[in-house]
Amino acid sequence: MGKEVASEKKRVQVLDDVKNTDFTAARNEFHFRTPWVVDKMIPMLKDERDLPMLCLLVNIVEVVLPGAMLVYGVNLWQPPMSLLTCNLVGIGYIVSVLLLFQERFTLCIHFASHRAIFTNEVLNTMIGWVLAPFFGIPCGVYKLHHVVMHHIENNHELDTSSTEPYQRDDWTEFLKYWFRFVVLIWPELPYYCFRTKKWAWFASAVSGLALWLAFVGFMARYVSLLGTTWVFIVPHVIAMSAMSFGNWSQHIFVKPDDRLSNYSLTYNCIDTPVNQTTFNDGYHIVHHLNARLHWTEIPQYFYDTREKHHQGGALTFRGLHFMDVGWLVMTKQLNKLAESYVHLGSKETAPTVEEVEQRLRSMLVRCDVAPAGTKKDK
């Protein structure tokens, strides 16, 4: 009787039964193509497959920068407009940027930091030093934080954004992580460069953070405090908080006894519309295995390395993205999350939903970390 009940338990879906729309869905990283401008800039691309990135960056110049000017214009208008009007315009600007561009730009600068988009180095530099502050990211910091620190240290000891020391389904633990990610970045990022003797990056970190702070301070004091609050300060708090929860969610599952393996420190999200707005960012195991892989090649690489993923114990979810996964974990909905799990092996070996739930729960505990500098990944 017990065996019959066990056999009737719901088993998770298998990859062979998944029709993955990541291969067929239309790209959605940009909103519109500006014909003359884009056509003139295409020859500047290193790889024409990055056309969606170019279109997105042009959209930002055409929409976000004029929007920021409007916020300042309203705050500087003479005779002065009411405080209510100024704040409503600021709120409208923030909401528009968040809904239309924030996530798209964050993943654009993400992949552009791994693989330069343009043949013109000035244009590449402008993404991280000129456009990034409009999305709450201090000048010149993103590549250092993500590519140099996070990927080299790989969510381990020297990575100040590591999730390993935390119980990753606890809000109090996340608040500790948030404070370190958002606030302590100021001293910790330069100190990381100092500790690892990356002197050029140390100079870049100090100058970038100082430039951003000086610029925001200047605009707040001498141009408009309220305008600067809406255009630069509020986006900074939102962006850093969102990225902290994003990285927390991406590395929320870590297998304690195999944490040095790329297959055991994150997971893949497949067949989700968010992959079409984030340059296939859902395949995070793939990204940690080969960070230089072009974003258009990522889904196929996942299938090409399916057996290695399976043997490595890789987690895969369908129809969800990182924020969804993080929210389900933090709200104690592991059973619901397990229902979206995709088994990479045969249908006969597929685990039950309950078995996946137990496995997920075991990967949320704090990790016993090795001495700093221990190397590294499979």
Image (tube, grey):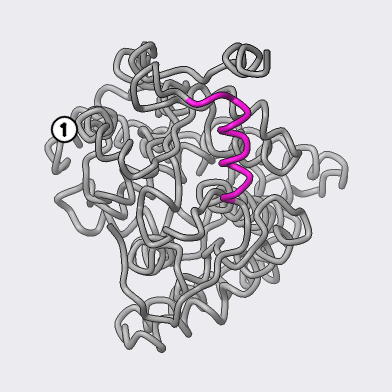
The residue segment tinted magenta is: 351-363
- Residue 334 is situated, as x and y percent measured from the top left of the image, at 67, 34
Location of residue 326 with respect to 7 vertically, above or below: below
What type of secondary structure mainly makes up the magenta span? helix
Quadrant of res 315: top left
Q: Residues within 10 Å of mark 1 (few under 14, many from 20)?
A: some
Q: Which residue is drawn at 42% across and 36% down?
A: 268
Tell me if 123 is positioned left or right of 185 in this view.
left
Residue 19 versus residue 229: which sits nearer the camera? 19
Quadrant of res 147: bottom left
Indicate the quadrant containing the N terminus: top left, top right, bottom left or bottom right.
top right
Location of residue 376 with respect to 235 vertically, above or below: below
Q: Name the residue under label 1.
A: 48
Indicate the quadrant containing the C terminus: top left, top right, bottom left or bottom right.
bottom left
- Residue 370 is situated, as x and y percent measured from the top left of the image, at 45, 77
Tell me if 288 is positioned left or right of 332 in this view.
left
The amino acid pointed to by label 1 is Glu
Per the image, label 1 sits on a secondary structure element best described as helix
Q: Which residue is drawn at 28% across and 33% down?
A: 302
Q: Which residue is drawn at 67% across and 29% down?
A: 335
Residue 2 versus residue 98: which sits nearer the camera? 2
- Residue 130 is situated, as x and y percent measured from the top left of the image, at 42, 57
Residue 376 versus residue 56: which sits nearer the camera? 376
Q: Does the magenta stretch include residue 353?
A: yes
Quadrant of res 45: top left
